[in-house]
Image (cartoon, grey):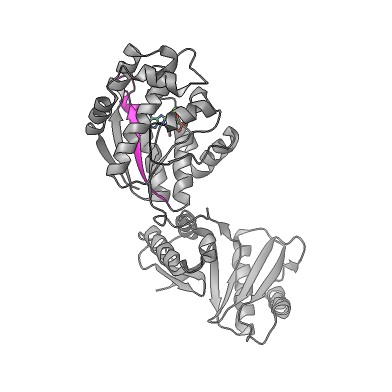
Amino acid sequence: MKKNLYIVRCGEVALKGMNKPYFERILLERVKKALESCEDAEVKWVDGLMFVRVPVSVSEDEVIEKCVRVFGVASVSPAVQASKDMDEIGRLAANYMNDVLKSEDIRTFKIKAKRADKTFPVESPEIARQVGGMVLKGCKVLSVDVHRPDVTLNVDVRKEAAYIFRDKVKGFGGLPLGTNGKGMILMSGGIDSPVAAFMMAKRGMSIEAVHFHSYPYTSQRAQEKVEDLVRLLTGYMGTVKMHVINLLPIQEEIVKNCPEDETTLLVRRFMMRIAEKIAEKSGCMMLITGENLGQVASQTAEALVVTDSVVDMPVMRPLIAMDKVDIMDKAREIGTYDISIQPYEDCCTVFLPKHPVTKPKIARIEKSESVLDVDALVKSAVESDKIVVIQP
Ligand code: ATP
Ligand code: MG
């Protein structure tokens, strides 16, 4: 069966020392899984590069799209393999450029040669010169421009063969999913938490989610929006188990018994407690939120301390020091933005105080909370957990 070749480069995985074989094995599995719908795809490591061969019937765009979404992949290049023979390399390079000419209006090119196999008798500058000459002969409309070429064609002479390839399509980098424990993301329908989940998964962390709603104050559609967001994220992090919890009974208790200006903060403390309990049960090591220093009243330094103090589990806040515009750009890049901006209510906005405290004191918050049966409220919320399994 005729197959197209792709070279996949790993970023940080290559920097690993003793653990490199472990990371490489998992990355290989992840790329294989990403290509599982492409029948007869072959994936293997050869000397620090991953070679992917996929039947020609699968489009180049599809293969690239699937590979660049795998965390740990730094870049992907469609490539052609040649034997280590200058004539063959030159001929295939010319064919390659003729193919490019069929669909693109280009006039200039440059050859960039690399000789990883130092026993190959022709040195890199000479490889570039000779292959360039053969391309010029085979593609009469092209000329060489070493400074600003329309296309740079790489020739990589390695131990087992030579490879000819052009653009590298950038991946997200990071580390392969599943190499860094499991975390529980507190997932709202907003812009921030999906980006936070993405960023932790990019560092290799498996993700489970918890979403709080206040049905019937929040609608069924609001929950579906969150499911849509998570479904989009599964394209990066595979199947996600999401715990769905109705927070309304707790919110009503708070509204009835506690100072109005502390409502949001008190609700957030309950969210953290419940999330921690569920995380413990599910084998998660950390909580993850989309909080961002100073963004809203509940995210001032003082408020974060008050929120943090109710849990023992480490709380990861990967967006803490980012600017909102950068978070929004990231959301656009990963594709969550358009879903996030759909106007559905969130449980946090249901009982929003007019003037929320921005510099809360733990002692005062604890006093307000002391009229509530915190343990019982948390317990019954945890027991009401409904699990939705969201698949790619
Ligand atoms: P986001 O854009 O993620 O909604 P935000 O800027 O709107 O964040 P808040 O509403 O204060 O900020 O929420 C802060 C964080 O608390 C969120 O990033 C998320 O991790 C968590 N959170 C908020 N609402 C919910 C919810 N309904 N279910 C689960 N987690 C939530
Ligand atoms: Mg929000």
In this view, the residue in front, 161 or 295, is 295
Q: Quadrant of residue 152?
A: bottom right
Q: In the picture shown, does residue 385 fall above or below 28?
A: above
Residue occupying the point 44% across, 42% down: 197
Q: Quadrant of residue 314?
A: top left
Q: In the picture shown, does residue 26 fall above or below 250?
A: below
Which quarter of the figure is the N terminus placed in? bottom left
- The quarter of the image that holds ligand 1 is top left
Considering every residue shown, the one lying at the far front of the view is 363
Q: Position of residue 210 (x, y in %)?
A: 34, 36
Q: What range is drawn magenta here?
A: 205-222
Residue occupying the point 38% across, 23% down: 267
Horizontal placement of 388 versus 310: left or right?
left
- Viewer can see residue 335: yes
Q: Position of residue 24 (x, y in %)?
A: 45, 66
Marks counted in the figure total 0
In this view, the residue in front, 56 or 119, is 119
Horizontal placement of 283 versus 356: left or right?
left
Residue 291 within the magenta-colored segment of the rendering = no
In this view, the residue in front, 283 or 213, is 283
- Viewer can see residue 242: no
Q: Position of residue 133 (x, y in %)?
A: 72, 77
